[in-house]
């Protein structure tokens, strides 16, 4: 099955609350590869690579986040063929 890649940018109170750690755990449970990293403006960027149905589940979770976070919004962008990143399957990094 072909994998898809999406980038999500999550805004709100999402830094210094364990958001990246919880995102990593959620992604691993859904067999999603990728990363979660803090952005300089206080948002968190998440790259999700995997099956579309599993990525949609992660997207729904990102809209809520862990109890320690307050999510104001999530912007979703599908990564084009030329922009795709090569990642090891099953690896989700916290950057």
Image: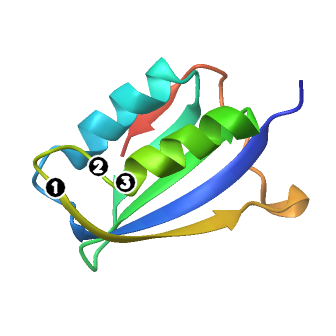
Q: Which residue, given by chain and number where applicable, does mark 1 sit on?
A: 69
Residue 41 drawn above or below residue 66? below
User: Is residue 36 visible to the viewer in this orientation of the structure?
Assistant: no
Q: CA distance from mark 2 to mark 3?
A: 15 Å
Residues under numbered marks 1 and 3 in contact, where contact means CB atoms less than 8 Å apart: no
Question: Percent position (x, y) of residue 30?
Answer: 53, 24
Image disc number at residue 37: 3
Residue ID at (78%, 52%):
84
Which circle's residue, 1 or 3, is located before the other in the chain? 3
Residue ID at (63%, 33%):
54
Question: Percent position (x, y) of residue 24?
Answer: 37, 33
What is the secondary structure assignment of the residue under circle 3?
strand
What is the secondary structure assignment of the residue under circle 2?
loop
Q: Which residue, given by chain and number where applicable, does mark 2 sit on?
A: 65
Q: Residues within 10 Å of mark 2 (few under 14, many from 20)?
A: many
Residue 93 drawn above or below residue 70? above
């Amino acid at each position: 099955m072909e994998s898809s890649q999406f980038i999500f940018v999550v805004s709100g109170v999402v830094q210094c609350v364990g958001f990246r750690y919880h995102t990593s755990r959620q992604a691993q449970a859904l067999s999603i590869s990728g990363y979660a990293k803090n952005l300089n403006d206080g948002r968190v960027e998440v790259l999700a690579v995997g099956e579309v149905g599993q990525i949609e589940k992660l997207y729904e979770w990102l809209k809520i986040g862990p109890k320690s976070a307050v999510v104001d919004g999530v912007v979703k962008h599908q990564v084009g063929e030329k922009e795709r990143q090569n990642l090891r399957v099953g690896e989700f990094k916290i950057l």
